[in-house]
């Protein structure tokens, strides 16, 4: 009795499996006839893709891909005949086709009970995917131009990922596809715009190979690590950016900012010295070294390197302003310890020293003003203090009016 029941179970299983594969065949016939019923074909295959009896059969996924291909072709025919056609539908069909054929290939590569692989789908599907692959770019651009970044990412990412499909391995797309790095950059950009930091991290390394946008890809990668709170990876990426693009200030400035904000001034100074060893007259490197000394209240060294920065660029208004500020802070530090009693024998000498600090600051603030008269934060407060302490009546009155 048990053997009879067991046989009935087997028969029922085979019957269900046969029924599902029959649906797959019906779907294929509905799509491939001269007058295709594509809606019916898609409905049948979608059910088969979910059914446990058919979802692990490569034929199911192959037919699903063929249906999408036929649907895409039908829209293309309408376009050629100048009939109304659905561009979005055509692109989405191509996207699904890549998903379905890739899954078909994965299942077809599973060895049979004899340990052999008989993949009868690969040759035809490889040819189809290669012919349609450029439409993934078109679909991505279509969505990107509409600011639909998540959708654009789906297309660009599929283009990049397809270069690593096992079924396309013989095409060696990682080396032969001259557009791969560029499209990887588009994927990185779309991912960044949609705040998908993991996708940025995934595609940016490939995008770095794009000669026009490589440095922007590294910037986006650094920003992604920062957004995820991975400061170690962020700093490492900035260092990589400096190595690959030494002329780009973004990486240097952000790395110094990281060191500075994490109280690693000594490491920051060491790094700046390495950069100055490569380019001793780089105004930014000189300015940053002055700024680092300024932050640890070493005003003499700060002034030295700010002056070197203006020697490298006589129009560097920010450096002039910081020279003036450093003199004012030296004056303040000196005044805190100087005698305040007019009867003190050292009072006059102390006042003369203080006056010298303000006199030293004056030309640098005035130069900053001359260079950037509209950027008052560089010179207004400084000149107010200078003119006040040097008792420069008319000049002080003019500045005081600007302060109000």
Image (cartoon, rainbow, N blue to C red):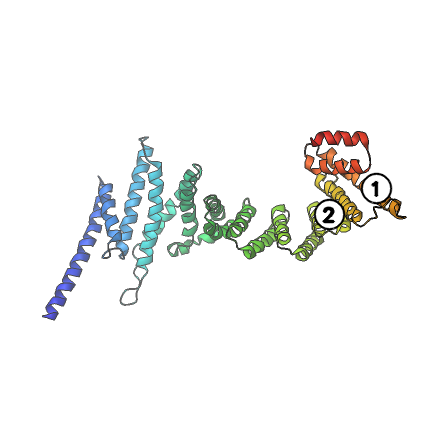
Of circles 1 and 2, which is in front?
1
Nearer-the-camera pick, 126 or 388: 388
Q: Secondary structure at mark 2?
A: loop
Mark 1 nearby-residue class (10 Å; few <14, some 14–19, many ≥20): some
Question: Which residue sits furthest right?
Answer: 345
Please tell me which residue is depicted at 43% across the width and 36% down the height of the picture: 146
- Quadrant location, the N terminus: bottom left
On the rendered structure, is 239 left or right of 207? right
Q: Of marks 1 and 2, which one's residue comes earlier in the chain?
A: 2
The answer to which image quadrant residue 387 occupies is: top right
How many dots with numbers?
2
Please tell me which residue is depicted at 87% across the width and 44% down the height of the picture: 342
* Residue 38's disc number: none
The answer to which image quadrant residue 374 occupies is: top right
Q: Secondary structure at mark 1?
A: helix
- For the residues labelled 1 and 2, say whether their Cβ atoms are less than 8 Å apart: no
Q: Is residue 122 visible?
A: no
Q: CA distance from mark 1 to mark 2?
A: 32 Å
Image coordinates of residue 394 in percent, x first then y, are: 80, 29
Mark 2 nearby-residue class (10 Å; few <14, some 14–19, many ≥20): some
Image coordinates of residue 319 in percent, x first then y, are: 72, 42
On the rendered structure, is 364 left or right of 81? right
Nearer-the-camera pick, 114 or 220: 220
* Residue 355's disc number: 1
* Residue 281's disc number: 2
- Quadrant location, the C terminus: top right
Please tell me which residue is depicted at 62% across the width and 55% down the height of the picture: 262
Please tell me which residue is depicted at 31% across the width and 58% down the height of the picture: 107
Image coordinates of residue 331 in percent, x first then y, are: 79, 45
Q: Taking 103 as reference, is 41 above or below it?
A: above
Image coordinates of residue 358 in percent, x first then y, are: 80, 41
On the rendered structure, is 245 left or right of 73? right
């Amino acid at each position: 009795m048990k053997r009879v029941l067991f046989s009935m179970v087997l028969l029922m299983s085979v019957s269900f499996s046969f029924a599902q594969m029959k649906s797959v065949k019906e779907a294929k016939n509905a799509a491939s006839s001269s007058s295709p019923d594509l809606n019916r074909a898609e409905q049948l295959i979608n059910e088969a893709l979910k059914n446990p009896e058919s979802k692990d059969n490569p034929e199911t996924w192959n037919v699903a891909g063929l249906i999408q291909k036929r649907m895409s072709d039908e829209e293309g025919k309408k376009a050629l005949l100048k009939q109304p056609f659905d561009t979005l539908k055509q692109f989405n069909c191509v996207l699904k086709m890549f998903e379905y054929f890739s899954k078909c290939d994965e299942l077809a590569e599973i060895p049979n009970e004899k340990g052999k692989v008989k993949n009868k789908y690969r040759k035809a599907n490889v040819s189809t995917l290669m012919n349609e692959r450029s439409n993934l770019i078109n679909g991505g651009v279509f969505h990107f131009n509409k600011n639909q970044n998540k959708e654009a990412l789906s297309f660009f990412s599929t283009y990049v990922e397809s270069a690593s499909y096992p079924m396309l391995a013989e095409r060696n797309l990682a080396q032969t596809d001259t557009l791969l790095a560029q499209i990887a950059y588009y994927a990185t950009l779309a991912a960044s715009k949609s705040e998908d930091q993991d996708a940025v991290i995934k595609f940016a390394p490939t995008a770095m190979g794009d000669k026009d946008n490589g440095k922007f890809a590294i910037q986006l990668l650094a920003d992604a690590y920062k957004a995820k709170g991975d400061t170690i990876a962020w700093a490492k990426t900035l260092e990589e950016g400096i190595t690959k693009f030494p002329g780009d200030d973004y990486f240097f400035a952000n790395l110094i900012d990281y060191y500075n904000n994490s109280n690693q001034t000594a490491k920051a100074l060491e790094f700046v010295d390495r950069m100055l060893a490569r380019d001793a007259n780089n105004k930014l490197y000189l300015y940053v070294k002055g700024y680092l000394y300024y932050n640890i209240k070493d005003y003499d060294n700060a002034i030295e390197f700010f002056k070197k920065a203006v020697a490298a660029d006589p129009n560097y208004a920010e450096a002039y302003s910081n020279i003036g500020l450093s003199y004012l802070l030296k004056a303040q530090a000196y005044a805190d310890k100087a005698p305040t009693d007019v009867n003190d024998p050292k009072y006059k000498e102390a006042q003369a020293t203080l006056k010298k600090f303000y006199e030293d600051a004056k030309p640098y603030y005035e130069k900053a003003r001359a260079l950037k008269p509209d950027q008052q934060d560089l010179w207004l407060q400084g000149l107010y203090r200078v003119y006040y302490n040097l008792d420069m009546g008319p000049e002080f009155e003019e500045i005081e009016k600007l302060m109000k």
